[in-house]
Image (cartoon, rainbow, N blue to C red):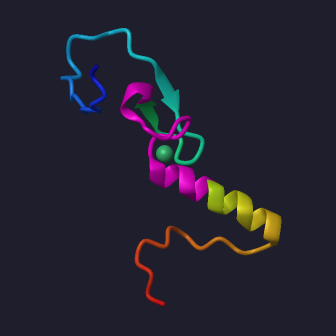
Amino acid sequence: MSGKRTRVEEPSSGLGGRQRLSCPTCGQEFVTADSAALPFCSDRCRSIDLKRWLGEEYGIPVESTGEDDSV
Ligand SMILES: [Zn+2]
């Protein structure tokens, strides 16, 4: 049984049948196989979208990318 989850990084050259997607948050095009947070390009964009969504729901103004939490 191979229950190990090893992340194998393949060289992007050679394969031509990779599916690409446009991130709904940043609009950047990315390879679906490279993302662990589909349909977003990254977990970061996913949380940004989620915050935006929640922000609209609760009427909280969304600050631009709060990278450093200085609170
Ligand atoms: Zn993105």
For this orientation, the residue located farthest to the bottom is 71
Q: Is residue 51 magenta?
A: no
Q: Is residue 45 above or below residue 32?
A: below
Left or right? Give the position of 57 relative to 33. Answer: right
Q: Where's residue 19, x and y in %?
A: 45, 18
**In this orientation, which residue lies closer to the viewer: 37 or 60?**
37
Left or right? Give the position of 3 relative to 41. Answer: left
Q: Is residue 58 above or below residue 3?
A: below
**In this orientation, which residue lies closer to the viewer: 24 or 9?**
9
Which quadrant: the N terminus? Answer: top left
Q: Residue at x 57, y 47 (%)?
A: 25
Q: Residue at x 80, y 70 (%)?
A: 58
Q: Residue at x 78, y 64 (%)?
A: 56
**In this orientation, which residue lies closer to the viewer: 26 or 66?**
66
Q: Is residue 12 above or below residue 69?
A: above
Q: Is residue 41 magenta?
A: yes
Q: Which residues are magenta?
A: 31-49
For this orientation, the residue located farthest to the front is 1
Examine the image and state in which quarter residue 10 appears: top left
Q: Where's residue 21, x and y in %?
A: 51, 27
**In this orientation, which residue lies closer to the viewer: 24 or 10?**
10
Q: Residue at x 22, y 28 (%)?
A: 8
Q: Where's residue 16, x and y in %?
A: 32, 9
Say how many tags the image has: 0
Left or right? Give the position of 49 relative to 58. Answer: left
